Image (cartoon, rainbow, N blue to C red):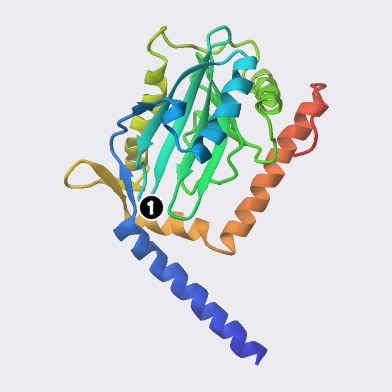
């Protein structure tokens, strides 16, 4: 009986790994353009406003000015994205609070970022989702979903800057053009995935769709048991980063 159960499970997993890329390639679309619509916090539904409002005050206390709250529209199939974007004009660092709404739930996280003259970009966030595509080589992203407050995450972000960009000062944007930085990230998403063979522009030029390479690799990374191992490796890597900051004599932080 156990042998039969194992055989059925193997057949099911095999079928899932075979069919999932076909479904993903035929249904998943990624917007080629991001048309931001500025919103006021008063315009947001109460549940969304409750996510953004506390962060505006907390980030303000850290020296980050709210540049605006934006509806980014549907960046991927069956989602709606909203973001509040912030700038610290003293340190040239940026921050954002992002919310992705799906038919089933709303997921939010906050993030700090800094760009340096040598091309390195550091991002530190509370996003617990591991990307299904390779990250850009000049971009280093650190994910700490268990850190609860911007104050704690910002402390870690500054320590990571000292570790990976010693002696360098973050690069800012001309006053009044800070939002262009946010738009560049959105604009470069699709073309970068075309270059690495994961996506291709659709015939109407309005969106990107997955190639067979992208569909297979992305779905397989997201399926069990690969997803289980990837999450474990990610947790270990991020805990090692926190441990390294303590070893370097920086401010100790509660284990995440």
Which quadrant of the structure image shows residue 168? top right
Q: Is residue 158 left or right of residue 96?
A: right
Say which quadrant the C terminus sits in. Answer: top right
Q: Determine the image quadrant of residue 123.
A: top right
Q: Residue 80, image x and y in percent?
A: 39, 43
Residue in the image at 68% along x and 46% along y = 235
- The location of residue 212, given as percent across then percent down, is 33, 57
The residue closer to the viewer here, 49 or 90, is: 49
Front residue of 101/131: it is 101
The answer to which image quadrant residue 74 occupies is top left
Residue at 50 percent across and 37 percent down: it is: 46
In the displayed structure, would residue 167 be above or below residue 122? above
Is 168 located above or below residue 40 in the figure?
above
Q: Is residue 124 left or right of residue 215?
A: right
Q: Position of residue 84 (x, y in %)?
A: 48, 27
Q: Secondary structure at mark 1?
A: helix
For label 1, the residue is: 214
| Residue drawn at (48%, 11%) of the image | 172
Q: Residue at x 51, y 16 (%)?
A: 87
């Amino acid at each position: 009986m156990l042998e039969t159960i194992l055989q059925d499970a193997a057949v099911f997993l095999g079928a899932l790994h075979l069919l999932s890329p076909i479904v993903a390639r035929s249904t998943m679309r990624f917007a080629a353009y991001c048309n931001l619509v500025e919103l006021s916090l008063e315009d947001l539904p109460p549940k969304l406003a409750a996510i953004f409002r506390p962060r505006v005050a907390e980030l303000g206390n850290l020296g980050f000015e709210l540049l605006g709250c934006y509806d980014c529209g549907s960046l991927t199939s069956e989602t709606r994205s909203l973001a509040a974007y912030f700038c610290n004009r003293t340190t040239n660092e940026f921050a954002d609070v992002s919310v992705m709404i799906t038919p089933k739930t709303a997921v939010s996280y906050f993030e700090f970022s800094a760009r340096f003259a040598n091309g390195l970009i550091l991002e530190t966030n509370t996003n617990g989702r591991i990307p299904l595509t390779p990250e850009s080589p000049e971009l280093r992203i650190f994910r700490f979903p268990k850190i609860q407050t911007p104050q704690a995450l910002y402390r870690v972000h500054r320590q990571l800057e000292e570790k990976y960009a010693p002696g360098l000062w973050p690069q800012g944007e001309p006053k009044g053009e800070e939002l262009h930085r946010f738009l560049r990230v959105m604009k470069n998403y699709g073309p970068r995935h075309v270059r690495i063979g994961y996506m291709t522009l659709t015939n109407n030029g309005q969106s990107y769709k997955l190639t067979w390479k992208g569909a297979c690799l992305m779905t397989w990374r997201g399926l069990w048991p690969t997803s289980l191992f990837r999450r474990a490796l990610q947790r270990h890597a991020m805990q090692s980063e926190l441990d390294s900051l303590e070893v370097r004599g920086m401010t100790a932080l509660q284990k995440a």
